[in-house]
Amino acid sequence: MNEHWWRSAVIYQIYVRSFADSDGDGVGDLSGIRSRLPHVKELGVDGIWLTPFYPSPGADHGYDVSDYVDVDPQFGTLDDFDALVADAHRLGLRVIVDIVPNHTSNEHQWFRNAVSDPQHPDRARYIFRSGRDGEPPNVWTSAFGGPAWTLDDASGEYYLHLFTPEQPDLDWHNGRVREDFEEILRFWLDRGVDGFRIDVGQALYKAPDLHDVHQPEPRPAFADWHTGINQAEVHGLYRSWRRLADSYPDERMYVGEVVLENQVELAKYVRPDELQLTFNFTFLYEDWNAKALRARIDRTLEAFGAVGATASWVLENHDVTRLPTRYGGGEEGRRRARAATLLLLGLPGAAFLYQGQELGLEEVELPDELRQDPVFFRTNGARKGRDGCRVPIPWSGGPPGFGFTAGSPWLPIPADWTALSAEAQEGSPQSSLALHRAALELRRRIDALRTGSFAWRASPSGTLLFERASGNETIVCVVNLNAEHLQLPDGELLLASEPAPGNLLPPSSAAWTRV
Ligand code: GLC
């Protein structure tokens, strides 16, 4: 079967400011990434996704873009970008870039024009409305705390921002917004990118009546409750984007950051003529619970299968607490995270890994005075924010730079990460790095694991057992979440996240067996 590359791809997310710093300013950059591509290649993934590196005032660390077709000087130049793509392609790695179409920076020329002159045509690119009885136009809230509207003093109108006030939302009903983004996509496609990760993919179109939607308390992780977004029009837009990508050679692709829990609704984004992939956060927000995980997997496979789409799986990114910490931290959290790696990479479909996940890094507890995430400030500290998963990568050596920087890292790297550095884990067969490399190597080599069919097998409660089969090869993935020791199936043990003496798999571990 001629398999589309993205259907079973493993993509490695690079959070640009925290990956590798080439010039000693303590912030990662594109040249730094180039120098560390061999690590990514050796890990064995199919490609990288770069978080935004475009010019940005940095109100949300790059997710507030002031120019969509350039590189922020702190990350390098367009030449550096071209060189990075060329290096990646030479190594056989695809390059996905982040596109942020829901909002611009308030320093984007469009927004500057919009506020400097209410008659300026660029005003219509944004959502300006009169208030209601001295209050904002509706009760919508920002995902980062506080109201979703800010008063533009000069005109007396409010503008909408689903995130910070420095990230005004675009009005996608405006034809020029649509035309300009097509040009932006072309700009990067022409430079050779293999695809785009679409930021806040469900939110671009707002209900034209901007009706009141009351936010549940606490704010849910998923956006299903918000009837003012996830509008039908967005699918027409993505169809046109798909046609654009398909007009280029070599299967360029999109992955949507669509934060919906309802899998049927989510699968609409990956119908055959829309996006190829969407993140599926339902898995990420689930506990270490066999029954619950199994139900999530079933719902995903059923809904995605119904539209002929490939599923995708993700456990970490730059917005969520690191996996070992979510799973309880310490030794137990570490074991569960290792086991979850074999679950993640054993499931059918595409998978995403976040930088540092391969090293088993835990969330960093930062002192409040070092925090930078707007989530922390906009909620007055009620939500700690996402800095703890964005601490730079420990490559080698020790504090302060850990091979990440010759200077002082923009967030401090914990002194006790010396033993977790890529260099320290290199050559240790028990390390998290070795486990990830071995799993990815098997997945590349064994068709059954990468593209084979999927079926559950019966297993005791507290465990998950499924098979992947292709031709006459069958691999069984066994996850013992919290049962007593679980007997491994007869066959050849390919990989286990913990030692399984006597073929008994202990709790909080997983294995792949060829049967
Ligand atoms: C997405 C990004 C997140 C960002 C937000 C606003 O959720 O992953 O980091 O803050 O969009 O652009």
Image (cartoon, rainbow, N blue to C red):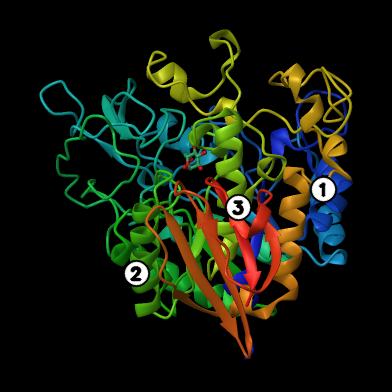
The tag on residue 253 is: none
Residue denoted by label 3: 341
Q: Is residue 233 visible?
A: no
In this view of the protein, which residue sits in the foreground, 464 or 450? Answer: 464
Residue at coordinates 55% horizontally, 74% vertically from top-left? 244
Q: Amino acid at mark 3?
A: Thr
Quarter residue 398 falls in: top right
Q: Is residue 510 visible?
A: yes
Q: Amino acid at mark 2?
A: Lys
Helix, strand or loop at disc 1? loop
Quarter residue 395 falls in: top right
The tag on residue 429 is: 1
Foreground tag (1 vs 3): 1
**For residue 394, above or below residue 470:** above
Q: Earlier in the sequence, mark 2 or mark 3?
A: 2
Where residue 134 appears, x then y in whole percent? 15, 20
